[in-house]
Amino acid sequence: MLFEFVISGITLCVLGIASWTDIKTREVPDWVDYGLLFAAFGIRTIFSFSEGWNILISGIIGFIICFGVACFLYYTHQWGGGDSKLLMGIGAVIGITYPFNSTSFTLVWFFIALLFIGAVYGLIWMFGIALQNWHIFSTKFVQKTQKQKFLQYILLGISLIFCSVLFFVPIVWFIIFFPLGIFYTFIFVTVIEENLFVKKISVKDVTEGDWLAKDVFIDEKKVQLRKTLEKSDVEKLHGFYDKGKIKSITIKIGIPFIPSFLFAYLVVVFGHSIFTLVGSFILF
């Protein structure tokens, strides 16, 4: 019980700091990411002397699983380095209980919560961005939908068919407008990403972890692929800038995603505590 209290308390503090810095600067300092990782293994090592080495093994297994997931997301350019390293720390914090039991799936529940909360959180954040830039968003949204009129008519026809078939089944009415809802959500996200989540900056201000939104060309030759920039990429771009061959690039701003980690962890931690409390009450 003390182990869970200590490691959960430290994790919540770290995730709170990481969320704040991500919102303010769109970056998470390495000392925060690595601090969580070292703290998780340090706490597990200390408690393993009194409560058994399974505590440390659990953290190692969780870290290995999240390391694999983080590498996949990073090298497929879905996440930045800060998000990926923080996920490794979360893996060491939550762990996978060994020998396996019901609590071994806590990390799986975290991934599910992160996926759901991240989607909702992302849509809410995008909606706020759209309101702040309503003139640009509304113009581009109308242009985008007008280019897809034929598809809209098809989806509207499908919705009308659903309406005629399911009209007397209120419990499934949400299916009626599901095709159109998915279509407009896709257009909404696409417009935001293409027009409001990009920014042109000077090459001298480029840092490791920035997301390059467009390939970089010099004299019609591609010199840098669109991707999450690593240290070697930044050094190469700075070299081109010093030689006067390129002045600016376009990067993706993106959503400060770290708060989703915090919310998902809160759901997992307090959800587990509530289930444990209810289970103890029933048994009592």
Image: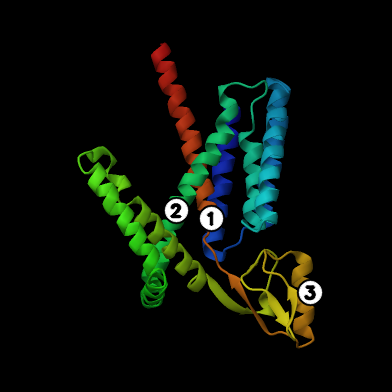
Which one is in front, 198 or 31?
198
> What residue is drawn where x is 64% and y is 33%?
95
Give residue 103's position: percent from left, percent from top: 57, 25
Task: Assess whether mark 1 and mark 2 are in contact (beta carbons under 8 angstroms).
Answer: yes
Q: Secondary structure at mark 3?
A: helix
Given the current orientation, which residue lies at the most extreme top position? Answer: 284
Crowdedness of circle 3 by 10 Å Cα count: few (<14), some, many (20+)? few
Using residue 224 as the reference point, say whether residue 254 is left or right of it: left
Badge 1: residue crowd in 10 Å (few <14, some 14–19, many ≥20):
many
| Of the image marks 3 and 2, the number of the one nearer the N terminus | 2
Distance from label 2 to label 1 (Cα)?
Answer: 8 Å
Q: Earlier in the sequence, mark 2 or mark 1?
A: 2
Please provide percent x and percent y for residue 158: 33, 53
Amino acid type of the residue that numbered disc 3 sits on in the rendered structure: Lys
User: In the drawing, what numbered circle is on residue 121?
Assistant: 2
At x 65%, y 67%, the residue is 210
Of the residues shown, which amino acid type is indicated by label 2? Tyr
Question: Colour scheme in the image?
Answer: rainbow
Q: Which residue appears at 56% of the width and 22% of the height?
A: 102
Please say if 66 is above or below 253.
Answer: above
Q: Which residue is mark 1?
A: 257
Give, as a three-letter code, the residue at label 1.
Phe
Dot 2 falls on a residue whose secondary structure is: helix
| Residue placed under numbered mark 3 in the picture | 236
Instruction: State the image quarter where residue 97 is shown.
Output: top right
